[in-house]
Image (cartoon, grey):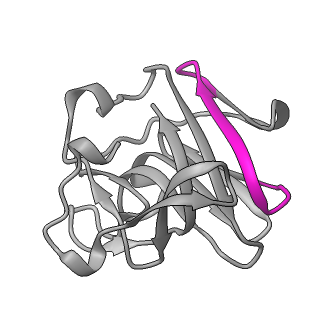
Amino acid sequence: FAHRARQSEAKSRPLYSSATATAGATVRLDGNDFLNLGQPEALDFAPGDPYTVVVVYRVSGKNSGTFVAKGGGEAGQRAYQCYVAPGRLGAIAYGIMQEKIVSPGANVAVYRCDGSRVDVSVADRPVFSFTVGKGSSDVDVLIGARRKNVDNTDIFYPLTGDLTEILI
């Protein structure tokens, strides 16, 4: 994912590591890093659009943050966000938020939205499912954080952990 991202601030660039506990190469985010994908048409999902996000990650129990997000402000103002909180995995789909308990550490999470419902699984086991809303957003798509504000400024909920793979 990094080949299409831009990050003008050197202190906010993730660290590439060739050997980690997750499985070979990974991108390590320390809570101050993120990648800005801009506003690519391919990731500009509107309410009712289907999408799938697959994340191979490692996040320690007390750490948290965003895997990928399009949106800022309150949950109802975000198009989508896939994230991890201490001991929980979460998703926002078109303005509706849901979280459930998951084991910390290395995992593979799959977020499947058919346009009306989201099904989230970890290690090929269902974790939660919910009906999506109608929220949307015109801000940049970020990996490793989300926009803090709806006017596409500042970052919030940055990830502390490893992203080995993210497929959207």
Residue at 55%, 48% in the rendered image: 164
Q: Nearer the viewer, residue 119 or 63?
A: 63
- Quadrant containing the C terminus is top left
In the rendered structure, the answer to whether residue 24 lies left or right of residue 128 reads left
Q: Residue placed farthest to the front in the image?
A: 19
Res. 157 in view: no
Verify whether residue 80 appears in magenta. no
Q: Magenta stretch mostly in which secondary structure?
A: strand
State which quadrant residue 155 falls in.
bottom left
Q: Nearer the viewer, residue 142 or 115?
A: 142
The range drawn in magenta is 100-117
Q: Position of residue 157 (x, y in %)?
A: 48, 71
Residue at 21%, 61% in the rendered image: 152
Residue at 69%, 60% in the rendered image: 21
Q: Position of residue 77 (x, y in %)?
A: 39, 53
Residue at 13%, 68% in the rendered image: 8
In the rendered structure, the answer to whether residue 103 lies left or right of residue 34 reads right
Res. 78 in view: yes
In the rendered structure, the answer to whether residue 105 lies left or right of residue 45 reads right
Q: Residue placed farthest to the left in the image?
A: 8
- Quadrant containing the N terminus is top left
Q: Taking 134 as reference, is 77 above or below it?
A: below
State which quadrant residue 45 falls in.
top left
Q: Position of residue 97 (x, y in %)?
A: 61, 51
Q: Position of residue 4 (x, y in %)?
A: 22, 42
All told, the count of numbered labels is: 0
